[in-house]
Every structure is written in structure tokens, then in C-alpha cells.
Amino acid sequence: MMSKRSRKLVVEGGEKLIDFNIKAFKPAPEKGIEDAVEVMRSGMMYRYQPKRLEDSHTSLFEKEFAEHLGCGYAVATNSCGSAMFIALNIAGVKPGDKVLSNAFTFTAVPSAIHHARAIPVFVESTDEWGLDAQDLEAKVIESGAKVLLMSYMRGHVPNMDDVMEVVRKHDLFFIEDCAHAYMTFWDGKPLGRFGDISCFSTQSSKGLSSGEGGILTTDVQEYAGKALLYAGSYEKRWNRHHNMDPEIMDSLQNEIPGYSMRMTEIVAAILRPQIPRLFEIHEIHKANYRYLEPILDSHPNIWVPKCHPKAEYFCDTMQFHLQGFSREDADRFIELMQMEGLGMQIFGADRNARDFRQWHYLQGDEDVDLPNTVQFIEFACDLSLQPHLNQGHMDIIAQVIFDVLDYINNG
Ligand SMILES: Cc1ncc(COP(=O)(O)O)c(C=O)c1O
């Protein structure tokens, strides 16, 4: 553990140690900027403007992402929320149907279920913030729901052997929310390869970053065909997507509404060079995470739960539980960290959008009883570790956290 505090905190009139922006998001690679500018100069911003498949950044991005993930098809959308909504439609979810999902996730996930006019059935979380497979089975039996939309919140991976056993046993339609799970693996297999459909986000804090954007992936041609139609392809524009069978597309054409959820050429141009960059930033994330984790975990007020030995994380964020603190102490911790220039949040505090008790738009869920999730988000801190940071930054982050804890412990 680090030495005791040798400086005044900002609240005591001291100087800030933090001279970097912990939350700065990744810039677009130069090649992406150049290509996006060219797209804008040429006026070819709409994905179906280029007449040939090989001239469309969006079509090429879909092909390249499918190859990266090792899946059959990728359909680019304007957000992950759109991709999840489309996936629920493909799963055949109708208004009033029940959909199983994490109690601990971002509000976009229950919102996608709400968008489909379905009713979420929340499943408990573990202390490591993954879905609790045992509770999943209990909720499947209790609710009779046939669709699971599961988030890997902050890249945390539940025991996938257990989850898949429940999925297979009860023949669930499984949609993976991989918004936080680029380059994340279970037993060497990438997340996004377990479900019937997977959804990724390219919103700015994510592994692929373009402000807004999403990707739906699948191995099933019919699902891909439906997805591109739901996203807003019309007439014969499906021929601007790779590997689509004309017979299947002719049979689907005009049977599916188009919700105008397409990706633009500008976004796809920004994203394409980021696919190879994922490998590079994953190495930086892992180095930073592996360096910081044992330091933080050595503090008596901090518990960093260990990832399952079969799981490998993207490591672009770190979560830890504050231990031995009251609610007031925990709130004070976040406030003082903010003053130190190290913005953090606690999932279970301050009207956080990842706290299911805040999702008031879901009517009828006031009495929902999820004691484990409440317990495991109550003191769960969330630290962003973007790839512009290095080990020197990790030392400073740890020092500031320890200084603030010391201040709170000793008044
Ligand atoms: C876990 C999770 N799933 C889905 C989404 C939705 O992504 P998007 O903003 O691309 O719709 C988010 C957004 O941050 C998220 O955190």
C-alpha cells in the first residue's frame, strides 16, 4: 500500500496533482479524418449513394467488422440502442412481451425494451457486476420470457458456461449487448459470438468511437437481411450489403418496416481505421489495468473483484467497491475526487442512469426486489482508463485516491 498523505487536498487549499483529463475520449485516427473529410467534400454522405459495394465506407466497415469478430454478417446502425431495438424486432418481440435483462446496465438497454413496447424482467447481478446465471434461470421459469437481452456492463463477463446452459436449456433467443465488450473473451471466444444477435456501440466512450453509431452482428442471413431492412434499406439497396442472397432478400423486401436507423458514410469512414487500432489500445488498457489493480486492491477501503480466470477484459475502465464507508462517506469521496480533478461516479448513487431504481419510465416496476444488485452497485466506483493514460498516470490516480480516502478516514 502507498505511503500516507504528504500533501494538502484541494479542499484544504492544496494544489491539484491531476494535470490530465482522465475522461478524454480517443481522437479519430488521421486516416479516418482524411476519409471523412473526403466524404463530406464529395457530398457522398449517405450510405447508399456510392453505386458499388466496394466504394461505400459503410459497406466496407460492415465487412471488415464481421471479419474482425469472425461472424457472418454485420449491419451498421446509428446507435447500439437502435441495433438492440432492431434485434428485439427480429426476435419477434411484441408489445406486452417479457424480455429478460440485467438489473445493472445503462438506461439505454431497458429503454430499447421499452421502445419495443415490451416489459423488462430484471435479473440480479453478481458482486463482479455480471448477470447472475442462477437468478436468470429462476426468472425464466417465473416469467416464461423467451428472449434475453444481456449486457456486459463495463465489460464485465458473467460465467458464460452457466449463462449458455440456461440459454440452451430454455431455448432463449439471446441478444448480446456488447456496447462495452470489444476485444473481450470467454475461454478464448470473443463476446458477440455467443448469441443469436449481438449489438455494439460506437458512441465516443466505446472501443470504436465515432460520436454515435452502432453495429448489429449475426451468423444468420435472414436476421441480417431483416436488420438491414429495419435499419432503413429499401428497394434493391440490400445489394449494397455484402453476401446477401437475392432470393432471401426478395422474400423479405416490403415485409419489414424501415426505421431509418442507418449509419452515415462519415461515421463509417471515421470507424474503419479504428478496427486494427483495437488491438493496440487493448494492450495499453491491459498494461494500465494490471498495474493499477493490485495497488488499489491493497487499500483496506477498496475491493477490486477479480475477473473469472476464463474471462479476458478490454480493461478500458476499472470498477471497485468502497468498503467500510457510510453513504455520506462515499458521496464525500466522489465529491472530493471531483475537486481533485478525478471525476468518478458511484453506480448506486446520485440518480445514476445505471441504477434500475431511476428508470421511472418503466411503469409497474416500483416493487421490483433486487437486493443483490442494490448491494453491489451501492458503493461501486467507476474509473475511466482511456488509452492516452500510462503507468505514470496510474501512480498519480492511486495517490490521489489514497489521499482522499486518508482524508475521509482521519477527518
Ligand atoms: C451497456 C450499454 N449498452 C448500450 C448502450 C447504448 O449505446 P448507444 O449510445 O450507442 O445507443 C450503452 C451506452 O452507453 C451502454 O452503456
Image (tube, rainbow, N blue to C red):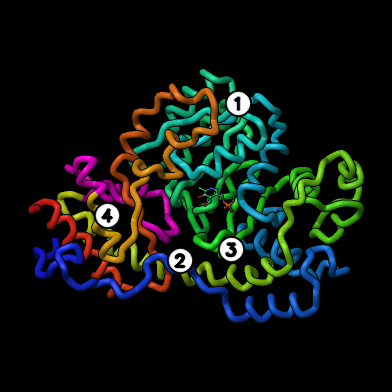
Dot 1 beta carbon under 8 Å from ligand 1: no
- Residue 82 falls left or right of residue 226: left
**Viewer-side label of 3, 4:** 4
Taking the magenta stretch, the answer to whether it contains residue 310 is: yes
> In terms of image quadrants, where is residue 135?
top left
Residue at the image point whose x is 49% and y is 24% from the top:
139
**Mark 1 crowdedness (10 Å alpha carbons): few <14, some 14-19, many ≥20:** many
Q: Amino acid at mark 4?
A: Glu
Q: Is residue 284 above or below residue 242?
A: below
Q: Amino acid at mark 3?
A: Gly
Disc 2 secondary structure class: helix
Disc sitting over residue 335 in the figure:
4
First in sequence, mark 3 or 4: give its number.
3
| Circles 4, 1 touching at the beta carbon (< 8 Å) | no
The secondary element bearing badge 4 is classed as helix
Residue type indicated by callout 1: Lys
Asked if the residues shown at circle 1 and circle 2 are in contact, with their CB atoms under 8 angstroms apart, the answer is no
Residue type marked 2? His
Under circle 1, the secondary element is strand
Mark 2 or 4: the one toward you: 4
- Please provide percent x and percent y for residue 210: 60, 65
